[in-house]
Image (cartoon, rainbow, N blue to C red):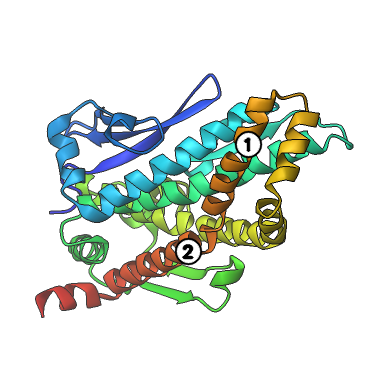
Amino acid sequence: AVLMGAMATELEIKESSVRFVVVKEDDAGEKFPVAEVIGGTGPETTVLKSEADYKKVTETAPALAAVEACSAQLLKLNDALKEASMVGVSVGPGNRLKYVAGDISADDAAAKKQLDDAKLAIQGFNNSYFTVKYQLVQMGMSGGIGAAISEMITEIKKIVSDIKPTLVVNYEKLQEGELDIKPDLGISHSKIANVCPKKLKKVLDAVFGEKFLTTGDPMSEGGLIGTLVDTAKQCAELMSKFNESKDALQELMSDPSGIVTKTTEAGFSQMQAMKMPGKVSSNVKQAMTTPIILAGLFKTIKDVAGEIQAGLSGTAGAAADA
């Protein structure tokens, strides 16, 4: 019942432009594209490859909302990368973007700002992308993540009966970017690695990462638990940078004539300069929503950790039966 027709996401980078692809894996393990998201708002920003499969996303409100929010972040990211020609991106651990930047002169304030904007856009996209990955996993697991993990434990007990899985989690320093989470399946990975059914392995990979069955590391790359820890850190860094810049952002909005003057001095035409305050105002308004977005992400982190904890302890199954 778990991970039936599950969907996932993959990142693609072409000529410094990023897009993400919703993919589906068939019973034979082959992946095929369901939709390509190129960034922005509106249906034209999603190129459908399998309309029937993507209909499942559109009919699942949290998943669709996550994809649409991430698409908006993707537009910001690609715009920032166009401005910051010295910045390149690649796909790093956990299917997240990382940046590489060329040398910047110490007195080149404009280039420094472009780099900072690009870094913030990458972080913002990565955090939004995490929510998409979570919602797609949630959508593919019958009854939700907690119920799927509870079912996973039941299947493992058919192989090794005497296991006591646990997950200890402390949210005290979550807002500071530290998610203290200690998962324990209650069994050595080596006892199930070679006898684990394919569907069970998919759930283990989704929760603990693709290297869990070979290394025993429950925080390995690609797993929800490791991604939770990394996302918490990224959210805190983004909030810290927002707090550092919010006064300057508000001051920038208060002086539109100064923006026109500086834009003209930078060599732009008068018409371009006159349009700049509106663009700046729009960007600042979007930036000021950062705390609300991050609050939602912190809540998602707690929700996911709570579901994993309930699934491992068996209370998710009990709640579903009640």
- Answer with the quarter of the image where residue 99 lies: top right
Q: How many marks?
A: 2
| Residue 258 position in % (x across, y down) | 75, 44
Residue shown at the point (48%, 51%) measured from the top left: 127
Residue shown at the point (54%, 19%) measured from the top left: 15
Residue shown at the point (15%, 46%) measured from the top left: 4
Q: Which label is found at residue 292?
A: 2
Name the foreground residue: 175 vs 202: 175
Q: Which label is found at residue 276?
A: 1
Q: Nearer the viewer, mark 1 or mark 2?
A: 1
- Left/right of residue 274 with respect to residue 113 in the rendered view: left
Q: Type of residue at label 2?
A: Ile
User: Which badge, 1 or 2, comes first in the chain's sequence?
Assistant: 1
Name the foreground residue: 255 vs 86: 255
| Residue 245 position in % (x across, y down) | 70, 56
Residue shown at the point (75%, 28%) measured from the top left: 102
Rendered view: 199 above or below 35: below
